[in-house]
Amino acid sequence: MNDLDTSLVGRTCTPDRPLRVAVLASGGGSNLQALLDARGQGPWDVVNVVVNVAGAGAIDRARAAGVSVVVVPHVGLSRAEHEGRVLDVLGAHDVELVVLAGYMRVVTEVFVSRFPQRILNVHPALLPSFPGLHGARQALSHGCRVTGCTVHLVDGGVDTGPILAQAAVPILDDDNEATLQRRIQLQEHKLLPAVVTAWSEGRVVQRGGLTRCCGVVVAAG
Ligand code: GRF
């Protein structure tokens, strides 16, 4: 393959054979909600939700939408045992694309190898700046004037996989962590469904040594 060749990362899906998406979450689930609300935007569907924290808001959101939700607590289990249980659930639902939407667990190489180039994560900063926890806090403490959010492929590192799409958020003079985090999340809620739709429409491709997600533009928020 030369540098100009393009190969599809996802598959081109159709309404009668939609992309089967699972969402993994740990918290309130606002990004899950954005995905649930965006169903119908493209040939994909949320077929399953897995939550690792009992009582997390994401559980109620999935139930309210009539989507299968399974709680797989990690407490008392080794990482391998927990991932094994999650993988069993995903396998039972023939999941094709896994979306980490506020899933506060680092997934291992074993997990990634079961879904190669088929795990998305949404991160509250413009990667490669500010990986890890507290993206908004880090941007504020560095005096940034612009930050944002990133949707990227998961590769086994912490927020290190290929970047697919980003949206910018200006930092206002009177921002604090909570106000900035809130505006970042509003951008996440647009960006994440747009990337899933792009994936299902065959707009995520390998080209020139990079993984690209074509046609996803979110105006600065
Ligand atoms: C999001 O801001 C996401 O960037 C981060 O965790 C947060 C989850 O929020 N990874 P929610 O549970 O989707 O509301």
Image (tube, rainbow, N blue to C red):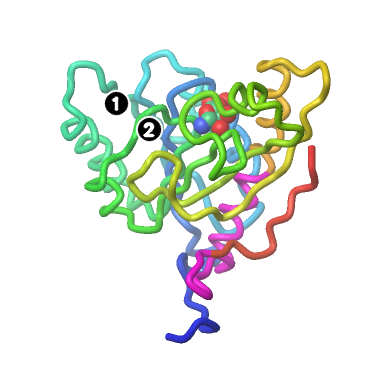
Would you name the residue on which mark 2 appears?
50
Q: Secondary structure at mark 2?
A: strand
The residue carrying pointer 2 sits among few (fewer than 14), some (14 to 19) or many (20 or more) residues within 10 Å by Cα, namely many
Callout 2–callout 1 Cβ contact below 8 Å: yes
Which amino acid, mark 2?
A: Val
Compare residues 82 and 217 and report the one nearer the observer.
217
Would you name the residue on which mark 1 appears?
72
* Residue name at image x 62 percent, y 57 percent: 42
> What is the magenta range?
191-211
Q: Position of residue 117 (x, y in %)?
A: 39, 58
Quadrant for the C terminus in the image? top right
Residue farthest along the right direction in this orientation: 173
* Residue name at image x 46 percent, y 65 percent: 10
Tell me, yes or no, whether the highlighted magenta stretch contains residue 203: yes
Which amino acid, mark 1?
A: Val
Q: Is residue 94 above or below residue 83?
A: below
Quadrant for the N terminus in the image? bottom left
Q: Position of residue 102 (x, y in %)?
A: 49, 30
Alpha-carbon span between mark 2 and mark 1: 7 Å
Q: Is residue 202 above or below residue 190?
A: below
| Left or right of 77, for residue 112 | right
Residue farthest along the front direction in this orientation: 142
Tell me, yes or no, whether the highlighted magenta stretch contains residue 132: no
* Residue name at image x 28 percent, y 21 percent: 73
* Residue name at image x 65 percent, y 45 percent: 191
Q: Is mark 2 within 8 Å of ligand 1?
A: no
Compare residues 39 and 177 and report the one nearer the observer.
177
Locate ligand 1 by image quadrant. top right
| Left or right of 101, for residue 178 | right
Q: Is residue 26 above or below residue 92?
A: above
| Left or right of 113, for residue 7 | right
